Image (tube, grey):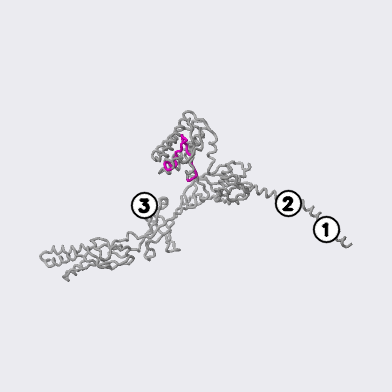
Amino acid sequence: MKNRKNIIIVLVTLLIGGLIGWLVKPSENVSSESVSDHDHAMEENQIWTCSMHPQIRQQEPGDCPICGMDLIPVSEDNGVVADPSVFRMSENALKLANVRTMTVGSGNAEKEVRLNGKVVVDEGNAYTQSTHIPGRIEQMRVNFTGESIQRGQTLATVYSPQLVTAQEELLQAQAIKESQPELFEAAKQKLRNWKIGENQIQQILNSGQAIQRFPITADVSGVVTEKIADQGDYLEQGMPVYEISNLEEVWVVFDLYESELGWIEEGSTVEYTIRSIPGEIFEGEINFIDPLLNSNTRVALARVEVNNENGRLKPGMFASGVVTNQLGQDSSEEIVVPKSAVLWTGERSLVYIKSDLADGAGFRLQEVTLGTSLGDSYVIENGLQEGDEIVVNGTFTVDAAVQLAGKPSMMNPDIYKEVLDETFTLPVEARNQAASIVETYLELKDALTEDDFDSAEKFAESLGRKLANIEPEELQEEAGASLAFYKEQLQERTLAITSAGDISEMRSNFDELSTVMIDFVSTFRPVDTSLFVQHCPMADNDRGADWLSLSREIRNPYYGEAMLTCGEVSKEIN
């Protein structure tokens, strides 16, 4: 009976537990579905891919498993952003990509020029001590450099056969000075020419004997910076014995490179430190800049004169200096941005401007004109206004995502989009002019192929003249606008080539010219024959570069004879 009661209690307990479980189960399913939906939404907002390998798609940031590049967020526009040039990223993607921005402001810009130099002897206080007496050095009284000496101090003694003979002539002339005073005076003058003083001459006359050894005395006080002669050396009159310098005044000499000459002038204040005197900052004024540039080191010297009565500065010590320049007028304000914010394509400089959106941020490419480089930042001349918010960290990540989304980016700025999608047929005269431009381009290409700088310069100048003569205004609106665009782009690149100082710089600019010329030919088809677009994967620091050719045969203008056949045909324009 008791067991039956226990069984009933257990069954009732199980029944109640099952009922509670059934009631709770729907609530748990709803919560699970909600969490699942939320996770799924988060996953969709966190899809990451590689700009080089778009087939890679991951739900978290990291490195591409193929090439190792940083993954970028997949475009999330979905028609939300009205402006097609704006790329949208969610707040979550911004955080994961470590994108940081700053608001542009204006203020007084300063440029610091850092200089390296050293302490040297003041050349105005350097003196070469020479001997006035020809003869053999019998004894050196000063035997090492760095020894301090005083004016009139005996430095060495000299035995001079010529001087002994001259003294004997003086003694003989003394005996007949009454009858031949002119001879006696000439004998004394001969000794004076050797810097023999009146007291020594009188000593010879009083003793009646020639002095065998004469002293070399210091003409100035200072420190011996070089010992030129040694004991036993035979010296002619005027030959150097010591270099003596007064170190109470020294120079601190700084090296100025060519790029720094425009920022330093005589009168500029420089703050400098001496490596061997840590913790102390010195200040001086640059009172001389070498007017000549050293042809080997490509530097000029800037000099600061320093009082060194306490002897703390010693020639040879290294110095580091800073000259601060105020840019513009005292009341002017400039826009300054970090270098990390600027994308530089070789010809144009770009930044990304951020705009706030309802569910994230939008980024738009903006071309800017760079001013002075301030070390880690640039002055912006045009393109930005105070209050603009720009990307300063993660700029390349944003650009890679923008490029993958097919929007205007560093490698594909929107300036090209409007003119590359259409082709136009030019009137006969304009078509002949365009054909002549292509012909001159090909002649320029051949000159670079043959390593002929002079001919390349001549053809580039000819190309510039032909571009100046073409008149886009005479064409219909769309064709004229397109031709005007190409004229401007080709002129800019042709000018860069004609301004090049050597063939290497010319080839660097030929890359940009060829890119525009290929588009120009594709748009207007000005020549009747086929043209071949050829590609060298090693040009432009292994980024690759294209050019046009009349023949399939590869003759590389970027390397000439060094790698004449490097490249391949990538396209044919009929």
Residue 497, picture quadrant:
top left
Instruction: Say if the magenta span includes residue 150.
Output: no
Q: Secondary structure at mark 1?
A: helix
Give the number of the disc on residue 517: none
The x and y percentages for residue 495 are: 44, 40
In the image, is 487 to the left or to the right of 33?
A: left
Give the number of the disc on residue 294: 3
Residue 360, visible in the rendered structure:
no
Q: Looking at the image, is 10 positioned above or below residue 61?
A: below
The x and y percentages for residue 179 are: 10, 65
18 or 82, which lies in front? 18
177 or 218, which lies in front? 218
Three-letter amino acid code at the position of disc 3 = Asn
The x and y percentages for residue 438 are: 46, 34
Q: Mark 3 or mark 2: name the one nearer the start of the chain.
A: 2
Location of mark 1 (residue): 13
